[in-house]
Image (cartoon, rainbow, N blue to C red):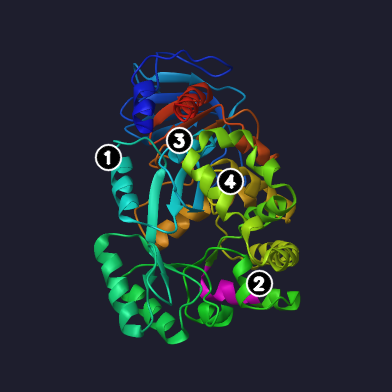
Amino acid sequence: MLLGVCFLLLSIALPLPGCVHGSGSGPAGSDEAVAFIGVNVVPMDSERVLPEQTVVVRDGLISAMGPASAITVPAGARRIEAKGRYLMPGLSDFHIHLHSDEQLLSYLAHGVTTVFELNGTPRHLKLREQIARREVLGPRLYTSSPLMDGGPEGGIVVSVNSPEQARQAVVRQKRAGYDAIKVYDNVAPGVYEQLVATAREQKLPVMGHVPRTVGVDAVLRARQAFISHGIEYFLAGSRDESRIAGFALGTKAAGTTVVPDLSHVHTSLRMMEDLEGVFSDPEARYLSPKVMSDWRYSNPTRRVDVRQFSERQRAAYPYVRHLTLSLQRAGVRLVLGTNASDAGLFPGKTVHLELAELVQAGLSPYEALATSTRNPAAFIEEHVEPAARFGTVAVGQHADLLLLPGNPLEDVGQAGQALGVMVRGQWLTREQLQRMRDKVAESFKQ
């Protein structure tokens, strides 16, 4: 029903108020030519700005880009007059948990055009295909398998307690169509080795945690493709910060991609101090009552070890900040992920909290933005989809774009002020996205 509301809004003519104006009425479909006129392009292929460009989008791809004198705007194209504005790639969040489908709209409203679900289900596989066919409006979706862990089966956990169970489970996930294997905390060393070996045979990246009895060093020796939290080094490796430099070099040598996920740690501390303050965020009105109810029972204040957890998180936060900067300096590929929509982590908005956290940890605005643009694309090209074309602004790339009022290379916060979002060539102004979200919020009151 909620996604139907979105399609209804997309099917009618809407005015375009505010400072971004375009000819024609209604949102542009991905098969309509669109031209951004006079825009400053932040291509994210390097730390640079291309001033006063004309960027033409056709059939969901960037078909032309260059100075106005060198680019012919197709007849009948929708013109977005964008002089003085900045155009950059759409953002990515590579650690989400899509607990309800209306969250797709929240990601788009915050400029997130690609996401990676890290606890997949058959519902996510179906949704991935519906989005790809443009039957559902949302960011490009990748999805891992259900999480694989030791111990008994429970919920959607796939139990792997022997090497043969691990081998069979990985093969099943490949046949089901998942993009990666998700590994969790309690996989035994021999089982882990078989899981990684089979995943490599099946050409699936292993993503997720550092199993506690395996440890960081063994995970890096196994060349696990992706570690989904910086805090994993703290939990499964050593709390001694003197080891961070070695971990950074080992991670680089392994070719392992890391999600720092500083906002996850910071938000857990905020909830310990002011739970109601976190939950009263204006973004809460766009979450389903079911999700908000779940947050009431799944937040850190409900833990039986609440004091120990609080002490651990307080120790982990500076550790992960130090680790993040060390990984960046060592040349490790960092990718932005937030763990949304677990308790307190609002879909889309938390991406901008994470960008700010990365800058505070010592990354430049360009380096922080790369974790949510070019770096995720590079991971996908290497491990999932060699022909992926997102993460930079260039001819031939998918038209997943953000139009910003200011230069994000000077102020990373500009990425959270998008005047409009283009996803697969479909142009949506900030006002249109807000109207869609207002409809969703109203539906929750009925």
For mark 1, give the secondary structure: loop
For mark 3, give the secondary structure: helix
- Residue at 63%, 28% in the rendered image: 405
Residue corresponding to mark 3:
105
Residue corresponding to mark 2:
234
Q: Is residue 249 magenta?
A: yes
Give the amino acid at mark 4. Answer: Val
Name which quarter of the figure residue 243 lies in.
bottom right
> How much space separates mark 2 and mark 3, taking CA atoms?
34 Å
> How much space separates mark 2 and mark 1, taking CA atoms?
41 Å
Residue corresponding to mark 4:
351
Residue corresponding to mark 1:
133
Q: Of callouts 2 and 4, which one flags the residue occurring earlier in the amino acid sequence? A: 2
User: What is the crowding at mark 3: few (fewer than 14 residues within 10 Å), some, or many (at least 20)?
Assistant: many
Label ID, residue 191? none
Horizontally, residue 428 falls left or right of residue 252, namely left
Residue 261 can be seen, yes or no: yes
Please give the range of residues in magenta. 247-256
Relative to 174, is 141 above or below?
above
Residue 338 can be seen, yes or no: no
> How much space separates mark 3 and mark 1, taking CA atoms?
17 Å
Give the amino acid at mark 1. Answer: Arg
Relative to 276, is 66 above or below?
above
Q: Position of residue 265 (x, y in %)?
A: 66, 58
**Furthest residue to the left?**
175
Q: Position of residue 139 (x, y in %)?
A: 42, 41
Relative to 250, is 370 above or below?
above
